[in-house]
Image: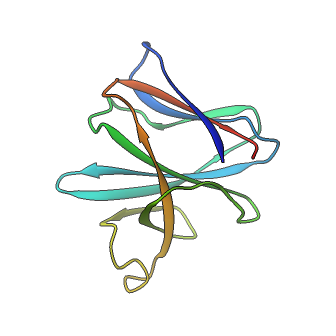
């Protein structure tokens, strides 16, 4: 996974820009109200961006997992969290399989407490 992380000063949000040649599906995780919450999927075409968080970033860290439409992992990391095959919003990051979800390894993005952050995903 090759990614570039930048911060800019305009609107408050977290955007993901797909710089690969493939369509990617993106899931995010954040710490919300005493626990982690994951949500997905945002489908982002080549050379397109999507705002995956539209409100002011309140958590310093945002967690990202992405795969192409064939299921090949594009962005991953060391933090295990839950995902589902279809659109989802899941509270809690433990016991994914027991609760009927899949486990994915999310990449931690340090937003440096800015209000807006853009993650660029490049081909491996």
Q: Residue at x 33, y 57 (%)?
A: 37
In the picture as drawn, the residue positioned furthest to the bottom comes out as 98
Image coordinates for residue 121, horizontal then vertical, percent: 65, 39
Image coordinates for residue 109, horizontal then vertical, percent: 44, 41
Answer with the quarter of the image where residue 36 lies.
bottom left
Query: Left of 104 or right of it: where is 95?
Result: left
Front in this rendered view, residue 16 or 110: 110
In the picture as drawn, the residue positioned furthest to the right comes out as 21
Image coordinates for residue 79, horizontal then vertical, percent: 42, 60
Vertical order, 42 against 12 (above or below):
below
Answer with the quarter of the image where residue 16 lies.
top right
Query: Left of 12 or right of it: where is 66?
Result: right
Q: Residue at x 37, y 82 (%)?
A: 99
Query: Left of 110 or right of it: where is 19?
Result: right
Front in this rendered view, residue 87 or 97: 97
The number of discs equals 0
Vertical order, 109 against 81 (above or below):
above
Image coordinates for residue 102, horizontal then vertical, percent: 50, 75
Q: Residue at x 56, y 67 (%)?
A: 86
């Amino acid at each position: 996974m090759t990614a570039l992380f930048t911060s800019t000063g305009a609107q408050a949000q977290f955007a993901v820009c797909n710089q690969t040649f493939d369509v990617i599906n993106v899931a995010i995780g954040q710490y919300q109200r005493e626990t982690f919450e994951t949500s997905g999927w945002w489908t982002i075409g080549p050379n397109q961006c999507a705002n995956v968080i539209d409100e002011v970033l309140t958590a310093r860290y945002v967690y990202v997992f992405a795969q192409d439409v064939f299921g090949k992992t594009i962005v991953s990391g060391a933090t295990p969290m839950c995902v589902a095959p279809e659109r989802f919003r899941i509270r809690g990051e433990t016991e994914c399989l027991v609760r009927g979800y899949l486990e994915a390894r999310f990449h931690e993005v340090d937003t440096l407490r800015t209000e807006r952050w853009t993650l660029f995903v490049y081909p491996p």
